[in-house]
Amino acid sequence: MNRDQALFEFLLRMGDSTLILSHRISEWCGHAPVIEEDIALANTALDLIGQTQFWLELAGEVEGKGRTADNLAHLRDAWDFRNLLLVERPNGDFGKTLMRQFLFDVWQSLMLAKLKGSSDQRIADIAEKASKEVAYHVERSANTVISLGDGTEESHQRMQDALEDLYPYVGEMFIGDKVDEVLVKAGIAPDPASLRAEYDRIVGDVMYKATLQLPEDDFAHQGGKTGRHTEHLGYILADMQFLQRAYPGAEW
Amino acid sequence: MVTLTRPSIDQVWQWLDTIPDPEIPVITLVDLGIIRDVEWQDQVLVITVTPTYSGCPATSIINLDIETTLREKGVENLRLERRLSPAWTTDWLSDKGRAALEKYGIAPPEPAGGPRRCPHCGGDNLEKTSQFGSTPCKALWRCKDCLEPFDYFKCI
Ligand SMILES: [Zn+2]
């Protein structure tokens, strides 16, 4: 695997994760429990779709086959997507959506902090831009997890259930492979495993404040980063890609 | 053949300073601080723009407005370039823009992370309703003196 092939894969991992999570939380638009939360979720989705645009645009450039960010988003099938399995998990209730968001936000903020020092200036620039937005996301999702975890008996139980359901999807963020090896060597991206200690510290601290118990078992589902997805991704793509599939090249 | 004199860089900045932000039309694109550079590269006028937020839906409208305005002024050859770094910061809002925001009922950004006073009554008994608002750049606050809700232009 040469450097550009590894870089292309890595950019898809970044861009597909923000794309699929953006789509997932946009499903809440008009359905959130209160209007402020509705707006917050829509704004977060918007930030994420904007970041997706940067990552996938660069992926297309690196690939050199003339594919745009839109082409990559709308005209690939599930096995070509490289997003984390975590972000394709169904929304569940509001608490579970925010738990998934928090688990992702912490990882994303640590990843972007490292990427700001990337030897590839284009990546460093995107990371600098995105990390400002993600600082807001993580602050909000952490606060919500704490309020709901340390809330009523019912909200506490729901958050504990959400954590147990989602935690097995956290490990995948930190598992490196050949792609990472090539990029670490080139100083482009960090070794994913190197983010784990800080991640555990932040998540542990928030869960403590939220009175939630982190599962002991650290079993990790994996496959998203290499294109082996759960059945949920297919449904997301069917929804998200319908228009471009049915009316190729449609613009408005 | 028509020979147009090339407008000066200052002239172009003045034109740009008449283009309203599509979402907060009381301030201009120059007030917002998103125009990073204006220069002639040979016969092409290059305008460098930075986005406020990555996914801000106003970005494409802003680009369109810049192009339309400058073409109306007779600029034939122009190119828009996007620059991500240094990332946009609310420190780049002009003083004129900050004053216009407050007059319009939007509290301008403060380094402390929250509004200094209520844009309606000037009171400082304030509380945050939500970190997010009607556009990516705003948060929702409420004044406990006059009981009015208001937008706060987030500091980033
Ligand atoms: Zn007031």
Image: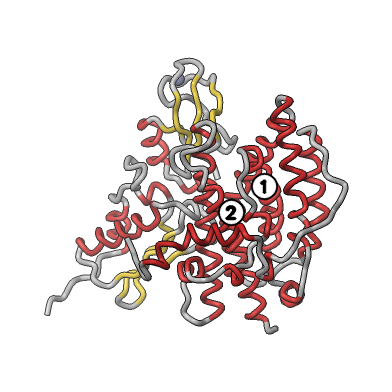
Q: Earlier in the sequence, mark 1 or mark 2?
A: 2
Residue at image mark 1 = A100
Q: Residue at x 77, y 53 (%)?
A: A168
Q: Residue at x 55, y 45 (%)?
A: B156
Q: Is residue A252 left or right of residue B72?
A: right
Using the image as rendered, state which of residue B129 and residue A42 is in the foreground.
A42
Q: Is residue A151 left or right of residue A243?
A: right
Furthest-top residue in this view: B145
Q: Residue at x 50, y 38 (%)?
A: A31
Residue A5 location (% of width, % of height)? 64, 80
Residue B48 appears in which quarter of the rendering? bottom left
Labels 1 and 2 positioned on one and the same chain = yes
Q: How many marks?
A: 2
Furthest-right residue in this view: A216
Asked whether residue A133 appears in the rendered view, the answer is: yes
Amino acid type shown at disc 1:
Arg
Asked if the residues shown at circle 1 and circle 2 are in contact, with their CB atoms under 8 angstroms apart, the answer is yes
Instruction: Assign a secondary structure to mark 2.
Output: helix
Residue B142 location (% of width, % of height)? 49, 24
- Is the C terminus of chain A in the top left, top right, bottom left or bottom right quadrant? bottom left
Amino acid type shown at disc 2:
Leu
Residue at image mark 2 = A21
Instruction: Assign a secondary structure to mark 1.
Output: helix
Alpha carbons under labels 1 and 2: distance apart: 9 Å
Using the image as rendered, state which of residue B73 and residue A85 is in the foreground.
A85
Q: Residue at x 23, y 64 (%)?
A: B71
Q: Is residue A227 above or below residue B144?
A: below
How many residues crowd around disc 2 within 10 Å: few (fewer than 14), some, or many (20 or more)?
Answer: many
Asked whether residue B86 appears in the rendered view, the answer is: no
Q: Is residue A187 above or below residue B144?
A: below
